[in-house]
Amino acid sequence: MFYELEIGGYVRVPPDALEGDIKEIILNKLNSQYGDFVSSDIGTILHIIDVVEIGEGIIIPGDGAAYYETKFKAITFKPELQEIVLGKVTEITDFGAFMEIGPIDGMIHISQTMDDFVSFNKSGSLTGKETKRSLKPRDKCRARIIAVSYKDLASQKIGLTMRQPWLGNLTWIEEDLKKIKKEKKE
């Protein structure tokens, strides 16, 4: 889920960067400081959109830089358990598929791709034995988040499933909807 949050923190501004509009300087520093920031509390910071409040600068002896206490607004992405996400398959392996969901990738184990016996093809796709449905890179899909791990903040792990009604490759969902409409007409 994407959020707009108000966050507080300190920003170090070196003396050579103190010329100009302090709000713009701090906004740029915040974006570079939090560019790859991941936390289990707030998720992944994508962008700092505004500086709400700037406190008085404090100079620490021996450093020369000014430290400003600030409040700022940030756009974050934090995956939530049971959340339905749209994404694009980026890679197929013999054990499952990786799907891009916003700024991070989630993994769909081969057993969670569809309600069918699934096999990995040398052509780089997963195919169901009975349904003959296939999953390949660049397919757009709908999945449910079933696991979120922040054990390693540099590489958070997201587990996904597509083994529920109205989840999976978007073309499969369209086919199922057409089938239901056709059955209702009969």
Image (spheres, grey):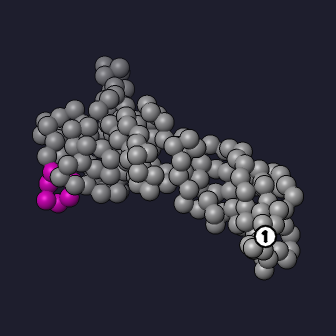
Above or below for 85 versus 53: above
The residue lying at 82 percent from left, 62 percent from top is 58
The residue lying at 67 percent from left, 44 percent from top is 4
Q: Is residue 95 left or right of residue 101?
A: left
The residue nearer to you, when weighing 39 against 27, is: 39
Magenta portion: prevailing SS class: loop
Q: Is residue 170 left or right of residue 74?
A: left
The residue nearer to you, when weighing 57 against 80, is: 57
The residue nearer to you, when weighing 157 against 117, is: 157
Q: Is any atom of residue 139 visible in this view?
A: no
The residue lying at 43 percent from left, 31 percent from top is 82
Say which amino acid is labelled 1: Pro
* Residue 73 rendering spot, x and y as whole percentages: 72, 50
* Residue 51 rendering spot, x and y as whole percentages: 78, 55
Q: Which residue is mark 1?
A: 61
Is the C terminus in the top left, top right, bottom left or bottom right quadrant?
Answer: top left
Residue 167 covered by magenta stretch: no
Q: Quadrant of residue 85?
A: top left
Q: Is residue 127 left or right of residue 55?
A: left
Residue 121 covered by magenta stretch: yes
Total numbered labels placed on residues in the image = 1
The residue lying at 41 percent from left, 40 percent from top is 148
Secondary structure under the numbered disc 1 in the rendered image: loop
Q: Quadrant of residue 143?
A: top left
Above or below for 64 versus 86: below
Is the N terminus in the top left, top right, bottom left or bottom right quadrant?
Answer: top right
* Residue 6 rendering spot, x and y as whole percentages: 72, 45
Query: Magenta segment range?
Result: 120-125
* Residue 72 rendering spot, x and y as whole percentages: 74, 51
Dot 1 surroundings within 10 Å: few (below 14), some, or many (20 or more)? Answer: few
